[in-house]
Image (tube, grey):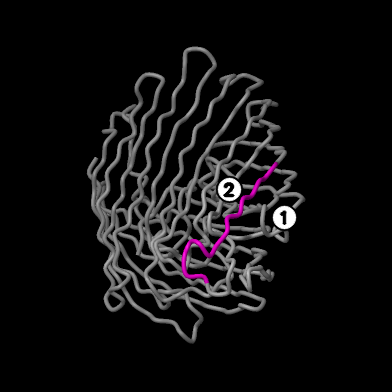
């Protein structure tokens, strides 16, 4: 139904497909080890989904679909510089619900630069298109085709090299758009900027203190009439976040490390004051490899605002939970755990569990005014998969997943979905 996407630029739409072909985007090899920096390939997946529209269980519609994809990329060192790019395009064909047929893509490009002195930085951009999964707010999804486009541009600069003291700045611009008119309220864009100072305690520990500012705009966030029919029936809402971040980064090895952030956050909204938030937020990402074959990872993220895990952070670690946008949320808590076991040199098994708890404030237009209601939105996803590396170029993988979502409040409902699929990919390097 959709292709795997880079870590921060796109929401979790269907757990199984992302798990089935998640390794596609990792095919670029740098030329330093003698391998080609370029790759090109193709993939074919077949997936069954018991609830393709993510609607309440009594209305569920099952279907299966195929996803045929092409991919290409490069990862090249040029002196002190590194350039990389990847493209991943899939045509997704449904057996019965052919209205959902779509072409999805995930594009990424970047440049890591460094000077002879102690100055370095990055530029990157991502563009993603796929069927939207309506697991992001407390509105019952509609049974129709809805395409989500999520894009991001990011830049960072760092002074200090590998010395004891470094200064860093980051900036990112992101946007989210939907094709279905029913989701006009969730169109939004945002900017994130931060500046901080970091001190290295030793070879494995680095501490940081930074100020971070976020600004998001949703041009059609609040309906002004009971039954809006067009853009003129909505008003905009802006949100500003101010954060003081304390960070710690402990890296015992590539496989065993912990990255943490504790923040004091003040989030304010121009329209719906009930969404305002003041308090502690933060994140923890941890990886642990007790043996060469076994790897564990865990993460916890608490954040506030519109689509907080998308707009508020630039360069989220790859271990971060990635289970969807959370529109109109006052605060969102997301956690994930996973384990990966290399049974043999060619066979790898993995298991994941992810949970998101969001406090959501919804607005309804009534006679020129708006009323608000609060709900809690709980999403749980569990998946299990096996990958077989047939050869250097060929890979086969199969996955199963279960998804369950519970909404409380006036618009409360529950849905669940079971997914299973297999994929084969070929990558030429």
Closer to the camera in the image, 381 or 399: 381
Q: Which mark is residue 22?
A: none
Closer to the camera in the image, 64 or 22: 64
Q: Which residues are magenta?
A: 228-242
Residue receiving disc 1:
276
CB within 8 Å, label 1 to label 2: no
x and y, in percent, of residue 224 in the image: 59, 66
SS type, badge 1: loop
Nearest to N terminus: mark 1 or mark 2: 2
Residue 32, relative to residue 215: is it above or below? above
Residue receiving disc 2:
216
Q: Residue at x 65, y 38 (%)?
A: 212
Taking 188 as reference, is 399 left or right? left
Residue 49, relative to residue 198: is it above or below? below
Q: Residue at x 39, y 51 (%)?
A: 128
Residue 233 on the magenta segment: yes
Taking 303 as reference, is 7 left or right? left
Alpha carbons under labels 1 and 2: distance apart: 13 Å
Q: Quadrant of the N terminus?
A: bottom left
Q: Residue at x 40, y 30 (%)?
A: 111
Among the 4 quarters of the image, the one containing residue 148? bottom left
Closer to the camera in the image, 2 or 260: 2
x and y, in percent, of residue 60 in the image: 44, 82
């Amino acid at each position: 139904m959709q292709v795997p996407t880079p870590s921060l630029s796109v929401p979790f739409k269907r757990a199984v497909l992302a798990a089935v072909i998640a390794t596609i985007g990792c095919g670029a090899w740098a030329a330093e080890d003698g391998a080609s920096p370029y790759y090109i390939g193709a993939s074919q997946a077949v997936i069954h989904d018991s609830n393709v529209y993510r609607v309440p269980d009594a209305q569920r519609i099952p279907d299966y679909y195929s996803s045929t994809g092409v991919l290409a990329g490069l990862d090249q060192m040029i002196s002190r510089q590194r350039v990389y790019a990847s493209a991943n395009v899939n045509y997704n064909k449904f057996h019965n619900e052919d209205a959902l047929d779509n072409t999805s893509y995930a594009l990424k490009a970047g440049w890591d630069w460094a000077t002879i002195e102690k100055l370095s930085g990055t530029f990157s951009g991502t563009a993603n298109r796929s069927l939207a999964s309506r697991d992001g707010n407390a509105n019952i999804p509609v049974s129709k085709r809805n395409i989500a486009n999520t894009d991001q541009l990011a830049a960072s600069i760092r002074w200090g090299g590998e010395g004891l003291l470094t200064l860093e700045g980051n900036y990112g611009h992101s946007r989210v758009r939907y094709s279905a008119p029913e989701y006009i309220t969730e169109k939004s864009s945002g900017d994130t900027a931060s500046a901080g100072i970091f001190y290295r305690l030793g070879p494995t520990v680095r501490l940081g203190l930074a100020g971070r500012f976020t600004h998001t705009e949703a041009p059609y966030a609040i309906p002004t009439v009971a039954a809006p029919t067009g853009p003129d029936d909505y008003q905009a809402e802006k949100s500003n976040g101010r954060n003081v971040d304390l960070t710690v980064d402990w890296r015992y090895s590539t496989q065993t490390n912990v990255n943490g952030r504790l923040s004091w956050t003040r989030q304010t909204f121009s329209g719906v004051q009930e969404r305002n938030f003041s308090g502690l937020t933060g994140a923890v990402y941890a990886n642990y490899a007790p043996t060469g074959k076994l790897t564990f990872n865990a993460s916890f993220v608490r954040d506030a605002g519109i689509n907080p895990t998308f707009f508020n952070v630039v360069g989220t670690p790859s271990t971060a939970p990635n289970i969807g946008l959370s529109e109109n949320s006052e605060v969102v808590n997301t956690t994930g755990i996973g384990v990966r076991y290399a049974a043999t040199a060619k066979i790898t098994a993995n298991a994941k569990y992810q949970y998101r708890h969001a406090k959501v404030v919804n607005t309804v237009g009534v006679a020129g005014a708006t009323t608000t209601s609060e709900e809690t939105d709980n999403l749980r996803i569990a998946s299990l998969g096996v990958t077989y590396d047939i050869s250097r170029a060929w890979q086969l993988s199969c996955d199963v997943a279960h998804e369950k979502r519970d909404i409380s409040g006036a618009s409360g409902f529950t849905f669940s979905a079971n997914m299973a699929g297999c994929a084969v990919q070929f990558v030429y390097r």
